[in-house]
Image (cartoon, coloured by chain):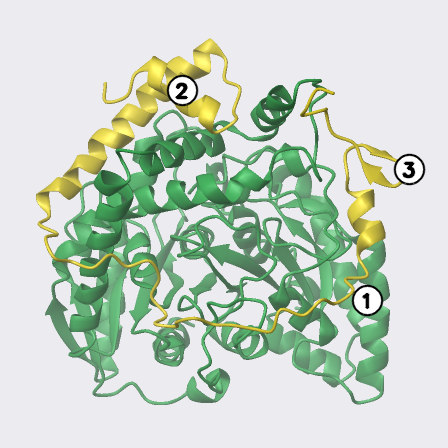
């Protein structure tokens, strides 16, 4: 296997995904198969080949950074999972 | 025989509305009747907008009565659920957004709705576009209207099935690496992936930002041309949209294709698992083009075989980054956890299906320290070579013709336990995506058991007009 269950655990933690033990085993197996397949790219000599990030050829598209009212505040608040006095409630991050 | 209104093409619906043979309300109601009758079985819609659509249809009828109709006025359409629609629930087919009602909307949808288009509802899909069978939806798989034991394809399976089953007149979907074309071929309808940058992606749920495109799924090539004229073009809200003028696609359809050169890339015909009936359907299309006076030229795109590997490194990498925003904090479904880490990790675990988790894991791995050069950078370098393959070949040919998929629709559950096998199903659709080229899938007959086969036409960058012109010629000959 290209990738172990321990590595899957570590990646899942980085990606903020809680996995069951069964899921860890299953993903280690399926992801190893996928990564093994990716080795096909090692056949290709890419010395001196520029990477392509996107294909439009557009460069540095800019706009003015203007502050505009969105008019969306009520709708945004309505989508929040937990609201008190019109504000988003989240678990405490810092102890006082 | 009187045709049901929902079975009309966009062009026929336009004519009927303008001639006042029927109203948009009647046309919309006909689509809802069909949805009501079929949605339990086909499962093409996650959300249906009965009330708002009938109001929109009434408003459209007023526009038509006062001679203010535009091409899409009063025409009922459906939208892939991974594309946001203002004030209409948009889940992306994942439970983490089960209750999400976007306050804003995709630019392409706003363009259609500002013409008076009637939004029927939101189509089922693989969650966030992750899949090629529509089995990765958290709202159940979509069934193929031609054989309900088969998949509809994916990721835009609900959109293709809804169009094929006449539950809408047309649909707007998203194609990252085949998500419009492959389901269109499985369901026997027309689907266009435009060139990267041709249509705005503002407001779509991003999957792989360097590959995502938005395009139509329709009953005819002419319908696709009409919709492209309405939705294409530069958008200040999407910095990757190009400034090139949008051509008059529908006017160009009838131009002759005589003496034009069609490339047949040999790599697309030498694929393991290629179905014989698919191969012979494609042969028939080539024969037709010969009859039209086209020059047929065998060509080679040597880096084709690496495109799946390139695609399935770039996509999960960009996916894992894009999906980081879905954490249960500001919107969507939040798990009831007191600790912040658990809140993130459990909300995401409950709200994503298996395939979304797999892609996030692959992407996080491929982008992590020590692996970035071996995976993401390497894939981007090979991407350059795939793109150059296409650029070289389009110096000699006007269009490339290939199957859309090596096989017709497969059984539900058949590939569900083998993610790699499902990735490999994208072999014919991923190269054009990686290179940013436009590609159209149109029906090319059916197998003996009645499953549709699709033929793919790939064009040079921004050559949508050429691709549509070829598609139109082939379509006329088949009817």
Q: Which residue is drawn at 74% across and 29% down?
A: A90
- Chain represented in green: B
Q: Find numbered disc 3 in the image and state the secondary structure of the residue it sits on.
A: loop
Q: Find numbered disc 1 in the image and state the secondary structure of the residue it sits on.
A: helix
Asked if badge 2 and badge 3 are on a common chain, one would say yes
Q: Mark 2 points at which residue?
A: A10
In the image, residue B316 sits, relative to residue B161, either above or below, namely above
Which residue lies most toward the top here? Answer: A21
Quarter of the figure that contains the C terminus of chain B? bottom left
The chain under label 1 reads B
Q: Distance between the residues labelled 2 and 1?
A: 50 Å
Q: Mark 3 points at which residue?
A: A85
Q: Find numbered disc 2 in the image and state the secondary structure of the residue it sits on.
A: helix
Label 3 or label 1, whichever lies nearer to me, is: 3
Q: Mark 1 points at which residue?
A: B56
Q: Nearer the viewer, residue B114 or B171?
A: B114
């Amino acid at each position: 296997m290209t990738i172990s269950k321990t590595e899957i655990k570590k990646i899942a933690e980085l990606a903020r995904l809680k996995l069951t033990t069964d899921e860890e085993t299953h993903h280690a197996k399926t992801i190893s198969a996928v990564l093994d397949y990716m080795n096909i790219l090692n056949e290709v000599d890419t010395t001196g080949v520029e990477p392509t990030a996107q294909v439009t050829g557009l460069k540095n598209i800019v706009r003015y950074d203007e502050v505009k009212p969105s008019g969306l505040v009520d709708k945004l608040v309505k989508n929040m999972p937990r609201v008190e006095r019109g504000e988003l409630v989240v678990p405490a991050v810092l102890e006082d | 025989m009187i045709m049901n209104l929902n079975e009309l093409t966009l062009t026929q619906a336009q004519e009927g509305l303008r001639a006042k043979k029927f109203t948009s309300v009647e046309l919309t109601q006909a689509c809802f009747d069909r949805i009501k009758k079929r949605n339990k079985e086909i499962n093409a819609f996650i959300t249906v907008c009965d009330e708002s659509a009938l109001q929109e249809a009434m408003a459209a009828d007023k526009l038509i009565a006062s001679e203010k109709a535009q091409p899409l006025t009063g025409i009922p359409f459906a939208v892939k659920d991974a594309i946001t629609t203002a004030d209409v629930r948009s889940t992306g087919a994942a439970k983490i957004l089960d209750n999400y009602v976007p306050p804003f909307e995709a630019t392409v949808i706003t363009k259609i709705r500002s013409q008076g288009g009637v939004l029927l509802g939101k189509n089922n899909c693989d969650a966030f576009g992750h899949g090629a069978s529509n089995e990765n939806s958290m709202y159940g798989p979509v069934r193929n209207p031609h054989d309900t034991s088969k998949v509809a394809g994916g990721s835009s399976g609900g959109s293709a099935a809804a169009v094929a089953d006449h539950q809408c007149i047309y649909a707007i979907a998203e194609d990252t690496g085949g998500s419009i074309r492959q389901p269109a071929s499985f369901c026997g309808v027309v689907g266009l992936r435009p060139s990267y940058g041709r249509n705005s992606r503002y407001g779509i749920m991003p999957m792989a930002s360097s590959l995502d495109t938005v395009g139509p799924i329709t009953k005819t090539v002419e319908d696709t041309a009409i919709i492209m004229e309405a939705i294409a073009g530069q958008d200040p809200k999407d910095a990757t949209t190009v400034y090139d003028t949008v051509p008059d696609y529908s006017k160009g359809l009838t131009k002759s294709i005589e003496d034009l050169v069609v490339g047949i890339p040999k790599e697309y015909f030498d694929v393991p698992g290629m179905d014989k009936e698919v191969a012979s359907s494609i042969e028939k299309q080539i024969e037709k083009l010969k009859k039209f006076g086209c020059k047929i030229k065998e060509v080679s795109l040597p880096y084709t075989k690496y495109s799946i590997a390139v695609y399935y490194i770039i996509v999960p990498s960009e996916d894992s980054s894009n999906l980081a925003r879905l954490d249960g904090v500001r919107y969507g479904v939040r798990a009831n956890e007191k600790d912040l880490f658990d809140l993130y990790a459990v909300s995401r675990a409950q709200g994503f299906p298996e395939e979304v988790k797999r892609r996030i894991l692959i992407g996080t791995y491929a982008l992590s320290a020590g692996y970035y050069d071996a995976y993401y950078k390497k894939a981007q370098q090979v991407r350059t070579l795939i793109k150059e393959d296409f650029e070289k070949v389009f110096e000699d040919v006007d269009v490339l013709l290939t199957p859309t998929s090596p096989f017709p629709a497969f059984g539900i559950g058949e590939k569900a336990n083998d993610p790699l096998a499902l990735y490999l199903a994208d072999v014919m659709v991923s190269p054009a995506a990686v290179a940013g080229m436009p590609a159209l899938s149109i029906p090319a007959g059916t197998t003996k058991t009645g499953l549709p086969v699709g033929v793919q036409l790939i064009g040079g960058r921004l050559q949508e007009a050429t691709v549509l012109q070829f598609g139109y010629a082939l379509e006329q000959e088949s009817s």
